[in-house]
Amino acid sequence: MTGLTAWAVFCGLLLGAGLWLIFVRMPFMRGIPFVERIEPQLRSQKLESRLLSTCSDIAPFGPLERILRPVVRDALRYLAKFNLGTTSLTKRLAKAGSGKSALDFRAEQLLWAAAGFTTAVVVVAAGAAGGRFSPVLAVASVLACALGGFLFRDYMLAVTIKRRERRMLAEFPSLAELMALAVGAGESATGALDRVCRTARGELAKEFALVLAATRAGTRLIEALHGFSGRTELGPLVRFVDGMVVAVERGTPLADVLRAQAADVRDSAKRELMEAAGRKEIAMMVPLVFGVLPLTVIFAVYPGLAALDLGF
């Protein structure tokens, strides 16, 4: 296939996609949702002016996103039939502290896959224009880039979760001691949480704010704490919640429990630091043995070999 033929195929695909978007995605060609059907009858109930209302339907990618939004919505609805781990994905989004739903994250994955697909198509078209084109390699690279974009978004979510968990564990000892001081001063567990949320900033403080909001909404403190431990699933935080629950239910000294939890987390951080230092020390032996030591031997032996060659 020559470069001119490749460009013709590429332009034909663009033309076909454009015609499909124009004719197939017209309003009269798709079903109207129930919300859109009853919206004209409900407009009289909205008493506020449209000039004062904030527009929440903002497309970050401009008109292109508005055009492709029905296609993405239909694709997400089709993928939802297969139930691709929606429950586990929702838990991961909660661990990352994201307010997005599973469908929103799947939409982002599709957009990243589309970006990878478009980039691969442009590169293949540029190579075909230069006379370098292989159909098998082109199809494989395009599919690999699309799949890579889809999986890379999931990888970024995992990285976000790990970073957030590290920040929460780093903030935990200070917040636990602050709660212990508040409880020792005579405040209840809810009052100590309120004081922490008002004075502290960070990821763990945000989670405590969610617990406090749940209690103010009518949820029991124990249930809100169990929901917090279910969202994080970190060992130190789960033990912290269990200790608070036991202290609240049985009346044991809560301040001592909080101080013990903070000391436990600090000791765990020290152990992890020592283990990381040991691993780094072993890793430093690799460049020393395979890099520095051979050069030292060469500098020590080469003058003698050179002297032997000269007949000294």
Image (cartoon, rainbow, N blue to C red):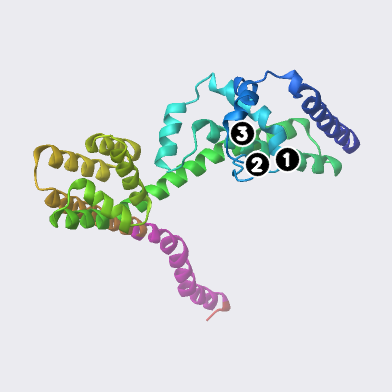
Kindly indicate the quadrant of the structure image that contains residue 275: bottom left
Q: Residue at x 81, y 32 (%)?
A: 14
Nearer to us: label 3 or label 2:
2
Gap in Å between the C-alphas at discs 3 and 1? 17 Å
Question: Which residue sits at x=42%, y=30%?
Answer: 88
Bin the neighbour count of mark 1 within 10 Å (Cα to Cα): few under 14, some 14-19, many 20 and up: few
Specify whether residue 172 is in view: no
Residue marked by disc 3:
110
Q: Would you name the residue on which mark 2 appears?
A: 59
Report helix, strand or loop for mark 2.
Answer: loop
Main secondary structure of the magenta stretch? helix
Q: Nearer the viewer, residue 128 or 134?
A: 128
Q: Could you tell which of marks 3 and 2 lies nearer the N-terminus?
A: 2
Which three-letter amino acid code belongs to the residue tagged 2?
Ala
* Position of residue 186 in the picture relative to residue 226 (left or right): left
Magenta span = 281-309
Question: Is 32 situated above or below 101?
Answer: above
Look at the image and tell me in which quarter the N terminus lies: top right
- Check disc 1 and report the residue beneath it: 63
| Residue 250 drawn at (x, y percent) | 9, 38
Disc 3: CA contacts within 10 A as few (<14), some (14-19) or many (>=20): many
User: Furthest residue to the right?
Assistant: 4
